Amino acid sequence: MDNINLGVPIGTTLDRFIKENQDEFPYATGELSQLLRDIALAGKIINREVNKSGLLDIAGSYGQQNVQGEEQQKLDLIANIRFIRALKNGGQVCGIISEEDEEIIHLNQNCRYVVAIDPLDGSSNIDVNVSIGTIFSIYRRISPLGGPVQAADVLQKGTEQVAAGYILYGSSTMMVYTTGHGVHGFTLEPSLGEFVLSHALMTCPEEGTIYSINEGSWHEFEPGIRNYLSDCKKDKLTARYIGSLVADYHRNMLKGGIYLYPKTIKNPHGKLRLLYECNALAFIAEQAGGMATDGHQRILEIQPHAFHQRSPFFIGSKKMVKNAMNYLI
Ligand code: AHG
Ligand code: MN
Ligand code: MN
């Protein structure tokens, strides 16, 4: 965190903040800075689509399933297209892995960066005006420049992320990201169309009182999870679950809490995807002083073997995550 320019005041635009803190980026060639700006631009475009979705015919299901057999919403697809276009036009990315596409999307072979994205997270909340998000991870490619992106470029451990973040389309729209030097949050000022620094060096309380899980799956949980949840109730913790990972995580990071998506009978490996849901949030959580595991292992150290691999996910306040892990065999 030493390199962060804390002299930058609240209200500084994202563009200026990135510029002032250029030194924090590995290799500091300006490419990663540009890539973050491209992601912010895509976020603004998606924010516009999300805000007007009730007025136009872009809410609801598209009538198709994605590669994981999940119903695709129109906005899922619009967000995916918008992101890919912004990253293609931005010219810093050689390949993208997206929740909405089975295979790698190949872009400019001469670029250094690979992006993993969940273009729109929390699909079930799109039609009902509840917070949704975008999640992204950025890696440096391993394979040489000038050739096609390889699977190994995408299948890197979370520890190799050079930057990660999310955009939360909530009561206000925020972009939160880290480059490994702390976590910073920027709120979209709608009349200016600019993200401005609103939350510098965000930290997650070590302990909290919120637990977030879809308890409707109670009968599908392993006994350890059920025991844990029973104790949460005995301890009079507060239950909060939106069903949008970004929003649930963001709240818990600010207030102190734990988010759990364990394995279930239906999803024996958990539901959330390692590459474009878990890793980004795990990087942010650790940078904010929190913790993220699959119940046994640090999320960031899991070696991915498939693009759309799932993982059980326990993330949030350090003491709460450690405590939950004690219940698992
Ligand atoms: P996505 O909309 O990208 O498919 O992700 C939805 C995820 C996540 O946002 C949320 O926390 C979780 O699915 C909710 O799952 P349940 O409906 O099983 O609780
Ligand atoms: Mn998602
Ligand atoms: Mn999604």
Image (cartoon, rainbow, N blue to C red):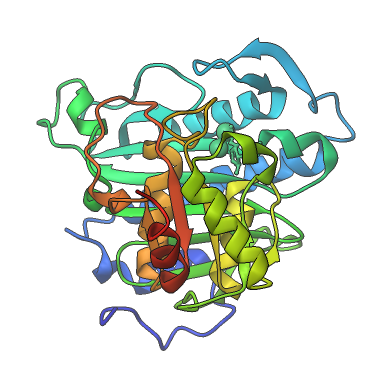
Q: Is residue 89 left or right of residue 329?
A: right
The x and y percentages for residue 192 are 70, 63
Quadrant containing the N terminus is bottom left
The x and y percentages for residue 286 are 35, 65
Q: How many numbered discs, if any?
A: 0
Please state which of residues 185 and 229 is positioned toward the viewer in this rendering: 229
Q: Is residue 285 left or right of residue 252?
A: left
Q: Name the residue located 31 percent from the left edge and 51 percent from the top edge.
A: 296
Q: Is residue 221 above or below residue 29?
A: above
Q: Is residue 229 above or below residue 136?
A: below
The x and y percentages for residue 302 are 25, 43
Q: Residue furthest right?
A: 55
The x and y percentages for residue 91 are 35, 36
Q: Name the residue located 49 percent from the left edge and 15 percent from the top edge.
A: 67
Residue 195 in sight here:
no
Q: Residue furthest left?
A: 144
Q: Name the residue located 39 percent from the left edge and 55 percent from the top edge.
A: 282
Ligand 1 occupies quarter: top right
Please state which of residues 9 and 60 is positioned toward the viewer in this rendering: 60
Q: Quadrant of residue 321?
A: bottom left
Q: Is residue 132 left or right of residue 32?
A: right
Q: Name the residue located 51 percent from the left edge and 23 percent from the top edge.
A: 100
Please state which of residues 25 and 171 is positioned toward the viewer in this rendering: 171
Q: Quadrant of residue 177?
A: bottom left
Q: Residue furthest top?
A: 64
Residue 41 in sight here:
yes
